[in-house]
């Protein structure tokens, strides 16, 4: 019982959210299940950024690029299943280019979708983190990256169908029959739980503690003989892997992927979820993503014109009044409560001791 | 060769535009060390002010330019006093708050002016022909504006009392405070000047590109890139940086296409960050 009490309150929140998501499909229509499945894929995406930003303090403004790499790989794979897709023939390509042939196998596409962001993060990380520039430059470069990547996707019309994106991606068909939305929902949820457990383990490990120390005091970590650059690169790669995974899961759920999903707007959206939920405790990523997206889907139905305005104001309010986010605030409250309770116990104990002396 | 010369001329034009857009940023980011994600929106506000003054109120273009400067500077003062002042030395919070502002500005302008593109008539018409190269007269005007803003900023920073205060605050804030100068006011006016320059950039851009609520985003990254290449704290560096980014982008675009040129310039910038993190033209600072 005493051990149970030591569990921080946010882990109970995580458990509550999991139970809610487990029973959610039983009480709602299919389109809501699809929506929630999308949100869970977003949760995985937000967790990947939480590792990078929340724990390590590296604020990426272009994380959707890594997400999109995963998504586009799987979307390309399924758009090439029935021979040369229409958007390629329109551009005068009559046979699938040799470098895309392996992608026709879904397994290869999944592996490519996971490895591409990792390799990319490794290369970019090697350039940015080994340099003596402050963390702000990482944010600026990733921002530019998101913009250029979107331009690139639109420009490569013959491979990516440009502005319209790749549509009609089935939910991982087995023998030609796609998974049902409900089944696929549970698969996404299962992967999300695994990712969550992995990140929990990672952040509790020594490696995770080093990551947090990079956020807190990078110079001191250097004095202790660690090489912060190496840790940053590895964290960025892990984060890229998880973001790619989120993209792979997301694309079949929404039926496709468009350049909007990899843009600056998408990259900053995930930042907002994390800021609202709270960074550096995983729960914030989960709660923030679900709350903001839920609110968005509710509010943008009735106030489509004002949603962005509301979002901006919410973000501003969060920065000024609860900079640690909603979950951060709850954890802080619980911490203060526990300290107070301990103090009350100690004073009571002292008083009783005094009584005994007399 | 004539293609190259034409691209070179276009590059000078793009460089001038980048310089105007980036000068405001180098003041705010370089001197004050504030990351202002709403910089692109300040440019956008300047462009809308120009549209309103020039197209709706039918005022002459140079008046519209002044109005754009003043409007953006006023918005800058508001941003600085209400938001940034409370967040100094908190880079993450500043970034998030100014990002929130940029979302709010885009949406507000969209609500006020509708999301459709607006157009500002070209104030200077005609084309100058030098051999095979043709340059619109307005481009020459942009280059002139860029150079005069550069000169103006240089004079402001180096020759005026206010500029001295600005530089002193960036070098040693506490010392300046000890000398009895209200650093908080210096911050506000520095920010206002940077914001005003962004508005001026918007005014100059308005006639060549259509004015839309979301136009700011592209200029934000372009100006950041320019500043990074030239060296964050150097005005001259920014001028040379804008030359390099503008020229390499247009010349490369002449040989392949614009997106590949952008990617190449991006790669060059990453390499610069790796091997010359203080920027290409930064002076040694003590």
Image (cartoon, rainbow, N blue to C red):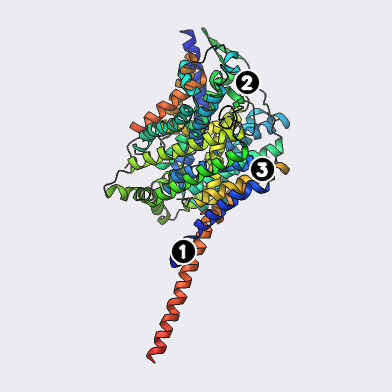
Q: Specify whether disc 3 shares its chain with disc 2.
A: no
Near-viewer residue (A93 or A186)? A186
Rendered residue at 59%/44% (across/down): B101
Q: Dividing the picture into quarters, in which one does residue A116 lie?
A: top left
Discs 1, 3 touching: Cβ within 8 Å? no
Residue A78 place in picture, x, y as percent: 55, 25
- In the image, taking residue A162 as reference, residue B260 lies left or right, namely left
Residue B112 place in picture, x, y as percent: 71, 38
Crowding near the residue tagged with mark 1, few <14, some 14–19, many ≥20 C-alpha atoms within 10 Å? few
Vertical side of A35 occupied by B203: above or below? above
- The residue carrying mark 2 is B124
| C-alpha separation, residue under disc 3 versus residue under disc 2 | 56 Å
Residue B51 place in picture, x, y as percent: 67, 31
| C-alpha separation, residue under disc 1 versus residue under disc 3 | 35 Å
- The residue carrying mark 1 is A4
Q: Dividing the picture into quarters, in which one does residue A136 lie?
A: top left
- The residue carrying mark 3 is A32
For the C terminus of chain A, which image quadrant? Answer: bottom left
Near-viewer residue (B239 or B164)? B239
User: Is residue A36 shown to the viewer in this render?
Assistant: yes
* Disc 2 chain ID: B
**Which callout, 3 or 2, points to the residue nearer the camera?**
3
Vertical side of A280 occupied by A174: above or below? above
Q: Specify whether disc 2 shares its chain with disc 1.
A: no
User: Is residue B158 shown to the viewer in this render?
Assistant: no
Near-viewer residue (A56 or A26)? A26
Kindly give the residue lying farthest to the front in the view shown.
A175
Vertical side of A317 occupied by B48: above or below? above
Residue A154 place in picture, x, y as percent: 56, 24
* Disc 1 chain ID: A
Q: Dot 2: what SS? A: loop
* Disc 3 chain ID: A
């Amino acid at each position: 019982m005493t051990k149970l009490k030591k569990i921080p309150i946010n882990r109970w929140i995580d458990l509550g959210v999991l139970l809610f998501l487990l029973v959610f499909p039983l009480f709602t229509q299919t389109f809501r299940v699809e929506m929630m499945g999308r949100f869970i894929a977003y949760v995985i995406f937000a967790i990947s950024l939480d590792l990078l930003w929340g724990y390590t303090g590296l604020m990426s403004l272009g994380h959707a690029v890594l997400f999109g790499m995963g998504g586009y790989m799987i979307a390309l794979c399924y758009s090439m299943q029935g021979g040369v897709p229409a958007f390629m023939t329109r551009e005068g390509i009559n046979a699938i280019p040799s470098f895309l042939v392996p992608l026709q196998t879904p397994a290869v596409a999944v592996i490519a979708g996971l490895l591409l962001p990792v390799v990319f993060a490794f290369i970019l990380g090697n350039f940015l983190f080994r340099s003596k520039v402050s963390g702000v430059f990482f944010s600026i470069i990733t921002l530019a990256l998101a913009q250029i990547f979107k331009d690139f996707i639109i420009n490569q019309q013959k491979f990516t169908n440009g502005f319209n994106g790749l549509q009609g991606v089935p939910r991982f068909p087995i023998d030609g029959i796609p998974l049902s939305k409900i089944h696929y929902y549970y698969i996404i949820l299962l992967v999300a739980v695994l990712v969550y457990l992995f990140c929990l383990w990672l952040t509790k490990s020594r490696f995770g503690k080093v990551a947090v120390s990079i956020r807190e005091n990078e110079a001191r970590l250097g004095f202790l003989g660690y090489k912060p650059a190496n840790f940053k690169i590895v964290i960025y790669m892990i984060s890229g892997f998880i973001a790619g995974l989120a993209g792979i899961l997301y694309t079949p759920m929404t039926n496709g992927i468009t350049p909007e999903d990899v843009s600056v707007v998408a990259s900053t959206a995930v930042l907002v979820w994390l800021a609202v939920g709270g960074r550096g405790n995983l729960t914030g990523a989960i709660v923030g993503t679900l709350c903001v997206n839920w609110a968005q889907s509710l509010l943008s139905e009735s106030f489509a014109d004002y949603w962005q305005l509301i979002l901006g104001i919410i973000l501003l309010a969060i920065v000024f009044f609860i900079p640690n986010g909603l979950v951060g605030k709850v954890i802080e409250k619980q911490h203060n409560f526990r300290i107070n309770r301990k103090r009350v116990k100690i004073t009571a104990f002292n008083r009783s001791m005094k009584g005994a002396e007399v | 060769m004539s293609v190259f010369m034409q691209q070179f001329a276009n590059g000078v034009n793009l460089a001038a535009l980048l310089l105007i857009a980036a000068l405001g940023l180098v003041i705010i980011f370089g001197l004050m060390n504030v990351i202002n994600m709403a910089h692109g929106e300040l440019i956008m506000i300047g462009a809308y002010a120009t549209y309103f003054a020039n197209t709706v109120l039918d005022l002459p273009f140079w008046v519209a330019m002044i109005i754009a400067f003043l409007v953006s500077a006023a918005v800058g003062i508001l941003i600085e006093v209400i938001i940034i002042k409370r967040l100094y030395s908190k880079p993450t919070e500043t970034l998030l708050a100014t990002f929130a502002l940029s979302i709010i500005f885009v949406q507000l302008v969209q609500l006020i002016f509708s999301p459709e593109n607006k157009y500002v008539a070209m104030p200077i018409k005609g084309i100058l022909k030098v051999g095979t190269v043709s340059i619109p007269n307005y481009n020459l005007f942009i280059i002139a504006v860029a150079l005069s803003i550069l000169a103006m900023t240089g004079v402001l920073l180096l020759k005026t009392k206010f500029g001295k205060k600005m530089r002193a605050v960036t070098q040693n804030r506490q010392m300046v405070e000890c000398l009895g100068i209200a650093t908080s006011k210096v911050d506000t006016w520095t920010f206002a000047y940077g914001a005003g320059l962004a508005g001026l950039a918007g005014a100059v851009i308005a006639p060549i590109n259509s004015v839309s609520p979301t136009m700011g985003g592209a200029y934000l990254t372009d100006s950041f890139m320019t500043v990074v290449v030239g060296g964050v704290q150097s005005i001259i560096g920014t001028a040379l940086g804008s030359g390099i980014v503008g020229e390499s982008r247009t010349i490369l675009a002449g040989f392949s296409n614009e997106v590949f040129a952008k990617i190449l310039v991006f790669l060059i910038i990453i390499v610069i960050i790796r091997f010359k993190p203080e920027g290409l033209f930064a002076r040694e600072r003590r």
